[in-house]
Amino acid sequence: MKRFFIKNYRALKGYWENYSSFRYSVYFVIVFGLLTFILSANIIPNQFRPELGKESPIEIRAEHDISVEDKAATEEARQKAEYSIPLTYTIDPRKTHQSLEQVHQVFDEVRGVLDQGIPGDRRIIVLRKAIPFPISEKTLLTLLNVSRAARSHIETESDDTLRKVMKKGVRENNVPQARIDIERMAKQFSDPGDYTDAITELAQEAIKPNEFPDWASRDKQAATIEKKFREEPITRRIEKGTVVVTKGEIISEEKMAILKDLGYFSSSPTNYTIAGMAILSLLLLGLTVFYLLHHHPDMFKQEKHLVLLAVILLLTLVTSKLLILVSGYLAPVAMASILIAILFDSRLALFATVILSLMVGLLTNEMRDIVVAFVGGCVSIFSVSRVSNRFQLTSASFLVAVANVVVILCFSLLVDESMSQFLDHALIGGINGLLCVILAIGILPFLEQFSGVTTPFRLMELADPNAPLLRNFLAECPGTYHHSIVVANLAENAAQAIKANSLLVRVGAYYHDIGKMRRPGFFIENQMGGENPHDKLNPTLSTLIVTAHTKDGLEMARAYKLPKEVQDIIVQHHGTRPVNYFYHQAVTKEGVDRVNKDDFRHEGPKPQSKEAAILMLADAAEAATRSLPKPTASKIEQTVNEVIRGSMLDGQLDECNLSFSELNILINTFIRLLTGMYHHRIEYPDMSKLSNVDKSGPKKGQVLRFGS
């Protein structure tokens, strides 16, 4: 048996790892099962769902005998039982010990004063500072002047008297009575020296409360009583046929509890209802798969994205199932719309909004809930389409809330609801807008981390000049950093012109040369007119150093956890283009027949996306234009055309999906921007060479001449 399970486990594991179609089939079955369960568990008897504080549209009678909790009677009985708990007191032996220690301390101080031979006129002063409580001068003189045996007797009787009184317990409000008891007990002694007054005063001054209420015991008994009434509440019986809720009655918490016991919140679907929901689930899930196959086929190449979409849909349904117990208007469809619009795109978010709105309708059996969910979801998609940071998402909550209130107003007018009912529903609709955005903001970072999807918010955070890696880049490679900024502006405008992801292109341009931080001095833009280390190296070694910056950049990008799309741009932004400068040097030294051009190429790979291709062309065009000695508009145009034509002939654009029309747009954009940046400017004259000019200024008809 064990061998059988091991064999089948290995077979399943092999299928799972090697066949994506098998995995997708498993995902489909799991999602289908969960979807059917969620929808089926919310079939409500009599097609009616009571709402707290709302009028009941129908009269409801008990369909069977039930016993319900009488909350008022239970609470009254619990309070009565708690009030009857007797308050007990306990004696704290530490307080008794402290009082006795203080009495003995007085006698220790007296003996110390006598043993030290302190003069009689100072003994009282010393003792008053040393003893723990104030006593009269008479008692102090008595203790100082009596014999040792008498003093010991006084100490013993004081201790015995105090101990007996405190043994009975002294409460805070019984201290005066305890002092009276001490005085009475001291008078019973018949001493030859009559030391009653000294014994009384010492014991009275030392006494303190030592008996306190046992609150812990009382709290424990109260907790026991509360638990008992919680587990065994007082109930009352409702017989079958009894009217529980009349038509138009406002449903209270007590009536809600009774309705719950009657099954209006329970789920006991029949086989037919389960079958019906299974068919509906299969239909909706099949429509989703069909839509993805035709409009988002790339998602099936990214398994995590499919799992992420399923998680968002199921999470929204589960949350809706919980929130609609309060009101159907709280279904957080807009949350899913926001998440899908940000993580994927608006078209998929709109389709998901339609599907989720229909599912909410299946949960609540209310047309108005479907419309509110759909309109709120659509508004949320439009409101987040242009957000560039997380804080701007908060504006979406206001727009969704307003949309919800408008739809609720429409339905209130249709069914002639009262103003109070409309206000209640409008408040819930407003809360829904805020709740959806709060949930989306809270969940989004976790979904980003799980799926690896690069959102605009993450890209905007990376584009911040204060990002740690960019700060280091500027400090270590100022020339390359400036070049990256110029390339970013050039590439971003080009990406916008062909409707590519311009934000990704800009961020990719910022980071595409970070690998040069490993050896900044080997790149001309960072040498600041100093010595060029390549002058001492052979062209092959120089090529290895220069081409290594893409691999170094990829390592740094992974270390800083840059998004996968940015990492791809870093490693692809040179493709497999040759380093022509060092190739030319090698050919000059060794001859063209002895040099293999492939040895002077970047490792690649070639650009795999439009964004990587745009950056490669922008980088090459900017570098070539910047190296022109006297750039003119015609030279810049010729250079840009040569760069892009050379990249095409070299096969660098074979693996991206740029069209010829898009390449023409890129060329025109590059020429326009580079001409604006690098065109030849007027050389201003040296004003020191002005001569023969009258200080009063030129006369009428006089011509100014420069030079001698």
Image (cartoon, helix red, strand yellow):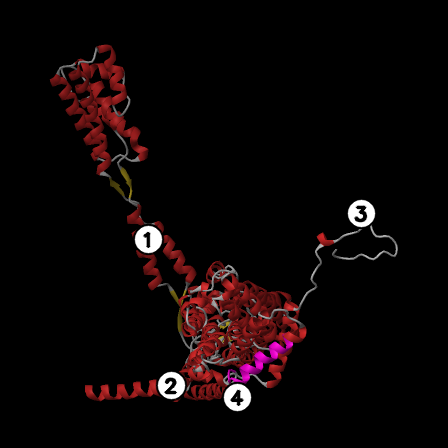
Residue placed under numbered mark 2 in the picture? 23
* Residue type at numbered disc 1: Ala
- The residue beneath circle 1 is 222
- State how far apart marks 1 and 2 are (Cα): 57 Å
Residue occupied by mark 4: 294
Tag 4, which secondary structure?
helix
Question: Residue 170: horizontal and vertical position, in percent?
Answer: 26, 34
Q: Quadrant of residue 308?
A: bottom left
Neighbours of disc 3 within 10 Å: few (<14), some (14-19), many (20+) = few
Chain-order first, disc 1 or disc 4: 1
How far apart are the alpha carbons under marks 1 and 4?
A: 66 Å
The residues colored magenta run 636-652
Mark nearer the viewer, 2 or 3: 3
Amino acid of disc 2: Arg
Q: Secondary structure at mark 1?
A: helix
Residue to which mark 3 is pinned: 695
- Location of residue 323 in the rendering, given as x and y in whole percent from the top left corner: 48, 70
Q: Quick one: label 3 or label 4, which is nearer the N terminus?
A: 4
Q: Badge 4 local density, few (<14 within 10 Å), some, or many (20+)?
A: few
Closer to the N terminus: mark 3 or mark 1?
Answer: 1
631 vs 686, nearest the viewer: 686
Residue 91 disc label: none
